[in-house]
Amino acid sequence: MMHRDDNTPPQSDWHTFSVEQTQRELVTRANGLTLTEAQSRISRYGPNRLAEPARRGPLTRLLHQFHNVLLYAMMGAAAITALLGHWLDTAVLMTAVLVNALIGFVQEGKAESALAAIRAMLAPHATVVRGGTRSEIDAATLVPGDVVVLASGDRVPADVRLMASRELRVDESALTGESEPVQKTLETVAQDAVLGERWCMAYAGTVVVHGQAEGIVVATGTRTELGRINRLLTGVENGTTPLLRQIERFGHGLAGVIAVVSVLTFILGWLWRGEPAGDMFMVVVALVASAIPEGLPAIMTVILARGVQRMAREKAIVRRLPAVETLGAVTVICTDKTGTLTRNEMTVLRVVTAGRRYDVSGAGYSPGGKFSLDGTGVDPHTDPELLLAVRAGALCNDARVLQDDNGGWRVEGDPTEGALLVLGAKAGLSQEALHAQWPRKDAIPFESQHRFMSTYHVDPAGTPWLFVKGAPERIFEMCSDQIAEPGGQAGDQAVAAVDIDGWRRKVTDAAAQGLRVLALAFRQAAPSGARLEFSDVERGFTLLALVGMIDPPRTEAIAAVAECHRAGIRVKMITGDHAETAKAIGAKLDIGVGKPAVTGAELALMGEAELRRVALEIDVFARASPEHKLRLVQALQDDGQVVAMTGDGVNDAPALKRADVGVAMGFKGTEAAKEAADIVLTDDNFASIAKAVRQGRGVYDNLKKFILFMLPADGGEALVVVAGVVLALGVAPLTPAQVLWINMVTSSTLGIALAFERAEPGIMERMPRPSGAPLLSWYFAWRVAFVSVLMMIGTLGLFYLEWRNGASLASARTMAVNALVAAEMFYLLNSRSIFRTALSRQGLFGNRIALLTIGVCFLLQMIFTYTPFMQRTFGSAPLNLREWLEVLAAGLLVFIGAELEKWAVRRAGWAERLTMQ
């Protein structure tokens, strides 16, 4: 702990300081600093705002987007087409380059936007006491030692040590992930207390939901807990995605192959065949133009964009385009609990009396649900003991349950009290009728130091009743009796001495199942005076029941987790909640069953090697801080896992940014979380993640299908060019301009159809693909080579036969061009599924876009073949019916050959194994 004379005040241990120690340490007092003192300190500590990081200028960011091997290839292809004078092709290629660069330029601002969102969480104004005078000031001028006033609805402007509090409850979920507002006290806590258990502190960026308080500012700006998270986020670098890594490796490899083949072809023709160097240069130009996959980045963007549209329908908004596919590659999903796996609506599941345990159905704030005893339905109106317990919980209550315009239900007030009102509604007790029949005369509100609430009512017969609810141990102290056995009218049941040990066992049993437990008791008496005082509720109560409640898991989340498990994806829960609660929810979701929950305090003591082991083996992590979440994500990535991380708070932002895919909650999430994330869920539902994973896998499948379609097409063209040199035909079967025409027609029309393929059946039954797997496996390389050879045989065969049989060179080349395009038309149908046959109604007609693109491509070939302008530009010539039939045969050769190859793979039983490559 630093001394007060240091320029930087102590940051992390203020929760161990009493109010008096804090005042001495910061040289302040109850009536605040003087204006002179405050002005002096702001020059020492700086303004109460988070520092903005240095940013690259827009021009630098834009130029950085062009540093990509595929964009280099596209720009090279554009340069070649420009040299050939094909300005339309050049314009198309450069447009695709600019579109890809602009997408990256827009998305690169993610980190800066996330930091800006965190900075915006600091309150713009604060109520401060200076020199004994209360005033509202710009929160940026707050300094350590200032006394601030907090009220319901305020955003806490700095880190504050509380010095006076009345029923203060603060929503700290943005920092801790804990779902319930935290009741604040003034007592110090242990030095190793986690952030969510520092009861005497209020932290910058959190929100006061109830009560009032005064406190001493102990940290401002970058020294706050919010500032610490901001520094974490600044230090997190964006990782590349598995797809981009694969594309980069593929692009480098392909560029190397093209360069080697081009050089060898030039040497072969010039030195061995004796062809003129100028002619061989044009052959190499044609070869390079045919082999460069200039359509890949553009079609990849289309496929990813189509995935964005499909994910949007599944309530997942994609902010960063490559994340579409990356989500399909994840091997681990690290998810928050509250609101994502659970409903974020406290629900009573159990009511325990002295002799019975009642189960309650229904989930959330909807009043639908039933009571049962040992599996048999129970009507509370025929069970006076149960009815009195339910009535006590509904009357000793300050919350309200309201119905939204869209039919949903919400709670105003404490979620725990809201759950008791919903319990009453399930028993047929409406709030309005209860308060009319049992009017409240007075109350003692809940305060953390007392740990109970009490209300005074009069029933319809005029009998006075006192009800209390609160922490079980506190209520036990007030009770001398318990209801001995069920029966009789309300208040007339036989009583016996309270069995505290028995009730404690019931509390332990419920808590072990992750339930939050409250106790309910009553006394038929009026206050001793005109007002209800603490002396009226010290003793003499009859213990009614224990109520066990929990934030229940979403029904659809249970199914979604099961689907992820079938897909080979590990689901890990990382929450700020208590370990027992996390384990109980995990058990209901089949997460971490039979394994212990590891707390943040335990993670903090682990070295990197042990952390990696634990991160892989354990599935439930509780009381986790931002650093813990970040370390867990990094440990999983170090082991080669592809990690998706969900979150909604500021505390989640560093881990969201570091994960391969950050998924933020759109409805209840903070702006900082959304800006740091790649994907935002509009319904905050884990089930939407599972649906998005399905779409992501479908996107990758479609990308593979396009590559398996594109490379044989390019390979067939390249083999035709090379074969013309090797066989010494004396003429090139294809000119560079014709090669570019084929590429433009097929890439612009045929290839785009594969972006519209739906996910194949059983896609969520596969294991995730290995993160280091190449884009082109050995089997796919075989498929590319096999189909390329088929295309070359059909094309070169037709060219050679026509030319040797006396046809003009223009006619022979026109047949070669049309044979290649026809082969690609037929092969498009083969490519709609990597292993399933195309010889079915679904295979041939299931994609209307594919049929449309084939029709457009056919029309373009008619224009190429028969219009005078195209004949002059590309050297084409008209064909007769016999020649068209030969072109059709060349296309069918490829279609039949590809189908036979897929049939052989299926018959050998290799399809499932090869799908994983």
Image (cartoon, rainbow, N blue to C red):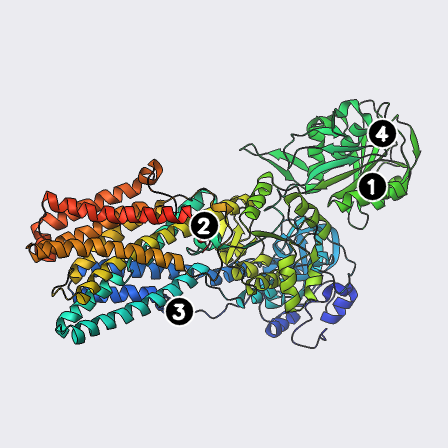
Q: Are marks 2 and 4 in contact (CB under 8 Å)?
A: no
Location of mark 4 (residue): 464
Q: Answer whether residue 123 is visible to the viewer in this image.
A: no
Q: Answer whether residue 710 is visible to the viewer in this image.
A: yes
Question: Quadrant of the image for the N terminus?
Answer: bottom right
Mark 4 element type: strand
Q: Mark 2 is on which residue type?
A: Arg
Residue reaching furthest to the right: 497
Residue 495, placed above or below residue 479: above
Q: Which is in the foreground here, disc 1 or disc 4? A: 1
Marker disc for residue 697? 2
Q: Which is in the foreground here, disc 2 or disc 4? A: 2
Q: Mark 3 is on which residue type?
A: Gly
Q: CA distance from mark 1 to mark 3?
A: 64 Å
Location of mark 1 (residue): 506
The image shows residue 833 at horizontal and vertical percentages of 37, 46
Q: Residues within 10 Å of mark 1 (few under 14, many from 20)?
A: some
The image shows residue 289 at horizontal and vertical percentages of 23, 63
Q: Earlier in the sequence, mark 3 or mark 2?
A: 3
Q: Which is in the foreground here, disc 1 or disc 3? A: 1
